Amino acid sequence: MTVAVDIAHRLGAFDLEARFESDGRLVALFGHSGSGKTSLVNLIGGLARPETGRIAVDGRVLVDVEAGVFVPAHKRRIGYVFQDARLFPHMSVAQNLRYGRFFAPAADRYADFDAVVSLLGIEPLLDRRPGRLSGGEKQRVAIGRALLASPRLILMDEPLASLDEARKAEILPYIETLRDEAGIPIVYVSHSIAEVARLATDVVALSGGRVAACGPAAQVLPRLDLSATGERDGESALIELAMATPDDGYGLSLLRSAAGGEWRLPRVDAPAGARLRVRIRARDVMLATQRPQGVSALNVLRVRIGAIAEGDGPQALVRLDHGGDALVARVTRRSVATLGLTPGREVFAIVKTVTFDPATSAPAPVPAES
Amino acid sequence: MDSGWGQGWGWWLDLSPSEWDAVRLSVRVSIWATLASLPLGILVAWVLARKEFWGKAVLNGVVHLPLILPPVVTGYLLLLTFGRRGPVGSFLHEHFGIVFSFRWTGAALACAVMAFPLMVRAIRLSIETVDRKLEAAAGTLGANPAWVFATVTLPLILPGIIAGMILAFAKAMGEFGATITFVSNIPGETQTLPSAIYTFTQVPGGNAGAMRLTLISIVIAMAALIASEALARRVAARLDVK
């Protein structure tokens, strides 16, 4: 399944010009407010018409302005989970779920009601009215409703943005299950680097209506320069680790990267051999020119410096390579100068175990079967 | 005053056959006027609420005209257009055998025209409050515009439709000027409650009859109002608007 977008669209003073192609199972459209994410999914979903350009999903041309093609939203079979759920208030949860069922041609109807209901854990809600659901329940029902229309692609526009942390934590596992088990590609809009890091297989980063970067999440995320966006957690790297020892007796888990690096994290609930995706924030990574002695930090890795991006401020972003795994470190420009950090040099990256946020350690996306 | 107040509460039920005719005719005319104009009312309300087109102001003006014009003028215009020699009236008579002038159907037409602006206004307001995002959501689920209207828009504007129908029914029950101008005041055919009351007030000793029909009018109006309230409450409960 490939989503191919090449459009130009003007919305008032805002200019959206995006071109990307992705065949990821969960493609995150990432960018801060006003970067054009929602406009872009609306164009894919058929809720808006681009001025020029072409959009194709899985080879099927949905929009080709030059050729005069515009498939209306109801014929696209693209599910859409809105930020505000948009459940029909005059129908019960079960009726909402069944709404899209009969619009899909019988031969293409793959979604099974009971399976979707149990996947999302919404059995107890079926007879309720949307007005009596919590925000998290509404979003689960909205996801189920989109899924039960048997779409070819699901768009999710910041489905967690209006929820508090507890509700987010409640829904994230369902989206992961959907990504890994339902087999429907998802385009996921988010301005939260934490969500993107946890969910995305691929990332399209938008900035000011342009595509800033596009590719597999582990490659794109460390490359993003987020210093200007005010993102609280800033840049981060994503690495995939395999569980070696679930508990070392101190409440820590030992994991190994493909490159042979050893990582000690706060205990993660996963069996030995399980593959996990871990997010390492740039500001949590320290650099040393010699292997440090007698430090409390448990993760010390030999890395090679890639590029160093120095901005106008006091900080610099140092890209690191650890046997194929990309890491980033945010240090001061002063340190870059005094330590003589230059591209190509081998240094040691130090990451304190306690800086890991357990919420951002998640099961790694299951590799797509092809 | 020969009002019969002293005869107790049962007296007003003692209607003469012609008075009963007026009551029945009024109810029939009002129900027909309301139901027959409803589809067009929803369509016009939807067009006015949702569409932008050249001449929208004109359509809006035409719909609201009966509200502003003296009812007699509306009735006279109906007579000119839908009378047996009028352009529309003669066409309908020749091709479909439908006659409006001096028939109860004409009374229903007059009532429908007079009540139309009220009905359209109520429905239009409720269409304007419908969250169009819900309609867009239905579209992404595969529903074409007609299905979206039938399964999302229509149920959501039901309270507005009920309010519009009640307003139209009440207006039709009270319609007098346009009706009497268009279809006259023929007992048993076009003599509605207001016409009958008017007739009573024009003859000596008609006070008792006028009072009886007045009370009947009040009862019908109250019953319609209470029924609409109950209906609106049930719909609101179904929509779970809290």
Image: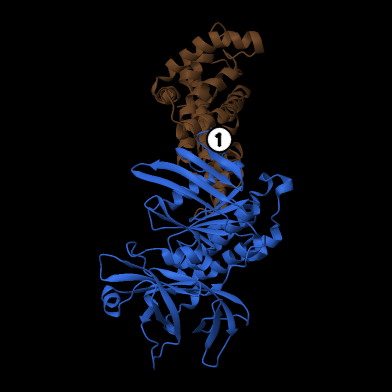
Chain colours: A blue, B brown
Q: Residue at x 63, y 63 (%)?
A: A368
Taking the view exactly as shown, the residue that stands out farthest to the top is B85
Nearer to us in this view, A217 or A319:
A319
Q: Chain of mark 1?
A: A
How many numbered discs? 1
Q: Amino acid at mark 1?
A: Val
Left or right for A17, reference A135 = left
> Percent position (x, y) of residue A220?
46, 63
Identity of the residue furthest to the right in this view: A107
Residue drawn at (50%, 67%), measured in percent from left and top?
A: A218
Locate residue B61: give its quadrant.
Answer: top left
User: Residue B217: percent from the left, percent from the top?
Assistant: 52, 32
According to the picture, the residue beneath numbered tag 1 turns out to be A69
Give the structural element (helix, strand or loop) at label 1: strand
Nearer the observer, B10 or B60: B60
Can residue B91 be seen in this snapshot?
yes
Residue B202 image position (x, y, % from top left): 46, 17
Q: Is residue A298 left or right of residue A247?
A: left
Question: Taking the image as drawn, is residue A92 in sight?
Answer: no
Crowd rating for badge 1 (residues with CA inside 10 Å; few <14, some 14–19, many 20+): few
| Coordinates of residue A297 in the picture (x, y in percent) | 41, 87
Residue A161 or residue B42, whichever sits in front? A161
Please say if A8 is above or below A342. Answer: above
Q: Residue at x 61, y 48 (%)?
A: A58
Name the quarter where the C terminus of chain A is drawn: bottom right
User: Which residue is nearer to you in this view: A19 or A174?
Assistant: A19
Please tell me whether residue A167 is drawn above or below residue B149 in the rendered image: below
